[in-house]
């Protein structure tokens, strides 16, 4: 009898608990159904982290299914950090209700701090939309700044005067029984970026050596080079800029013992520079002089020469919710002989054709008639195969394309990191 009573009580308890959890699950599911649908459009963001930190929306795989399309673009800041411009574009019932928030990282922040920063700004931008759903009653807003806000009103004194410095040293070593490779690279740079000026100075050195053992033959491949570069740009209004590029280099691959050049330039952006993260149509012209000292006598019997050259380029870049596109055309020639010229064209497209179907195409083509530094002695088969010396070519061509189609559930809310490297 006692066992029967216990069983009856336990059954009632389980039934009550089951109903409670079922009701909680039902309520949760009802709320989830009414949550806004979000499409994340950011190739460089930690999407899994965003899903964990912002669980009160539905993440969908197709932009057309979304109530809010979040488009995130990036630009480098003058301090060496990254500015994330986050555009929240309303769709369907939220058509025309757009928002924009910005997060700027500092150069010494870790990747974890950066993802926390832009995720926090995404959450703030979403509040306009979430506040119109039943989930708003389950959200709280907190303020965690303990110090007085008066400190923000103080004028910041920058002892570095907006200058940012960077030094790098990299090495790589690889060894097999019949092959070894060693590479060393070092670089140093200094930059100052303000709304009026952009100044960039850099220097680098690189050296690599490969060793191939083929039966009784050992082949060595050595390449080395160094360069010093300068870019100075002055802003003139919202569309115009003037500046210069200066360059000093040496490179074993291009038969360059020592060369220097100086090119003043002018640039015009059809769109306002303030819109550069979403769209640019840039026209740039530069003209200047350079002097080359060659390692070996060239095809034109020169061991050194000075050359005037000019260049015109046009570049278009657009990133919108439907995808992104870029294209560029660049032509140049030496002024002493207009037959010594080059023309290059590049274009790329990523386009969402329809639900789940997307197309990507990228291509580059160039006509090359200005290889004045080619050595008269040519290159040995080993130098050609190991890419130790540049060889003559009147054209270059590359093409990449892809087509992808995804179907199934439109929702993509779940994060499961188990055995991440297995698929």
Image: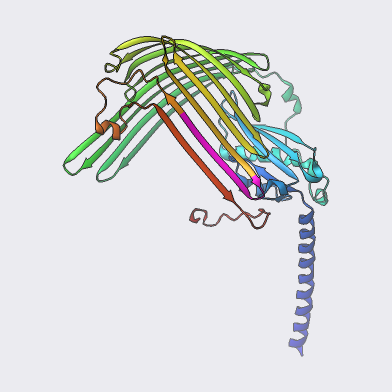
Q: Identify the residue at image location x=71%, y=20%.
A: 154
Applied colour scheme: rainbow
Instruction: Give how far across and how far down residue 77 sits, in percent.
Output: 60, 26
User: Residue pushed farthest front?
Assistant: 339
Where, by quadrant of the figure, is residue 19 drawn?
bottom right
User: Residue pushed farthest bottom?
Assistant: 1
Asked if the stretch drawn in magenta spans residue 360, the answer is yes
Instruction: Give how far across and how far down residue 71 sits, in percent.
Output: 67, 38
Query: Is the stretch drawn in magenta largely helix, strand or loop?
Result: strand
Asked if the stretch drawn in magenta spans residue 146, the answer is no
> Which one is in front, 324 or 209?
324
Is 177 left or right of 282, judged from the image as shown?
left
Is 105 left or right of 121, judged from the image as shown?
left
Instruction: Report the span colored magenta.
Output: 353-365
Instruction: Give how far across and how far down residue 159 sits, in percent.
Output: 59, 17
Where, by quadrant of the figure, is residue 236 drawn?
top right
In the rendered image, is residue 140 in sight? no
Check the picture and name the quadrant holding the N terminus.
bottom right
The tally of labels here is 0
Name above or below for residue 153 compared with residue 398.
above
In the rendered image, is residue 114 in sight? yes
> Which one is in front, 94 or 225?
94
Where, by quadrant of the figure, is residue 82 drawn?
top right
Instruction: Give how far across and how far down residue 37 sits, in percent.
Output: 74, 49
């Amino acid at each position: 009898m006692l066992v029967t009573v216990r069983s009856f009580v336990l059954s009632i308890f389980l039934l009550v608990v089951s109903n409670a959890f079922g009701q909680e699950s039902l309520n949760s599911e009802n709320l989830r159904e009414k949550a806004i649908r979000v499409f994340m459009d950011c190739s460089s963001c930690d999407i899994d982290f965003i899903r964990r930190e912002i669980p009160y929306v539905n993440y969908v795989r197709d932009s057309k299914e979304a109530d809010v399309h979040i488009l995130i673009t990036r630009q480098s800041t003058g301090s060496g950090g990254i500015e994330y411009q986050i555009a929240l574009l309303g769709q369907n019932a939220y058509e025309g209700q757009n928002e924009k928030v910005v997060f700027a990282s500092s150069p010494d922040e870790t990747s974890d701090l950066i993802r926390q920063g832009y995720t926090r700004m995404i959450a703030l931008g979403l509040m306009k939309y979430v506040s119109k759903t039943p989930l708003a009653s389950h959200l709280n807003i907190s303020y965690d700044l303990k110090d007085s806000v008066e400190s923000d009103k103080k004028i910041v004194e920058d002892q570095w005067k907006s200058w940012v410095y960077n030094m790098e040293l990299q090495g790589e070593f690889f060894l097999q029984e019949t092959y070894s490779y060693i590479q060393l690279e070092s670089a140093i740079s200094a930059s100052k970026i303000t709304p009026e000026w952009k100044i960039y100075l850099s220097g680098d050195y690189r050296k690599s050596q490969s060793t191939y053992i083929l039966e009784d033959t050992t082949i060595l491949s050595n390449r080395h080079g160094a360069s010093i570069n300068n870019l100075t740009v002055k802003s003139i209004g919202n569309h115009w800029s003037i500046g210069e590029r200066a360059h000093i280099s040496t490179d074993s691959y291009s038969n360059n013992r020592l060369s220097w050049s100086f090119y003043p330039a002018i640039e015009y952006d059809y769109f306002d520079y303030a819109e550069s993260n979403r769209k640019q149509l840039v026209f740039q012209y530069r003209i200047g002089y350079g002097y080359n000292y060659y390692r070996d006598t060239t095809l034109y019997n020169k061991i050194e020469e000075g050359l005037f050259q000019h260049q015109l380029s046009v570049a278009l870049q657009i990133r919108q919710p439907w995808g992104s596109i870029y294209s560029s055309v660049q032509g140049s020639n030496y002024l002493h002989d207009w037959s010594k010229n080059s023309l290059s064209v590049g274009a790329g497209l990523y386009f969402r054709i329809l639900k789940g179907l997307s197309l990507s195409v990228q291509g580059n083509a160039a006509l090359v008639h200005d290889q004045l530094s080619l050595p008269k002695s040519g290159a040995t088969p080993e130098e050609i195969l190991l890419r130790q010396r540049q060889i003559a070519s009147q054209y270059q061509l590359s093409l990449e394309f892809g087509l992808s189609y995804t179907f199934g559930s439109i929702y993509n809310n779940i994060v499961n990191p188990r055995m991440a490297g297995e698929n």
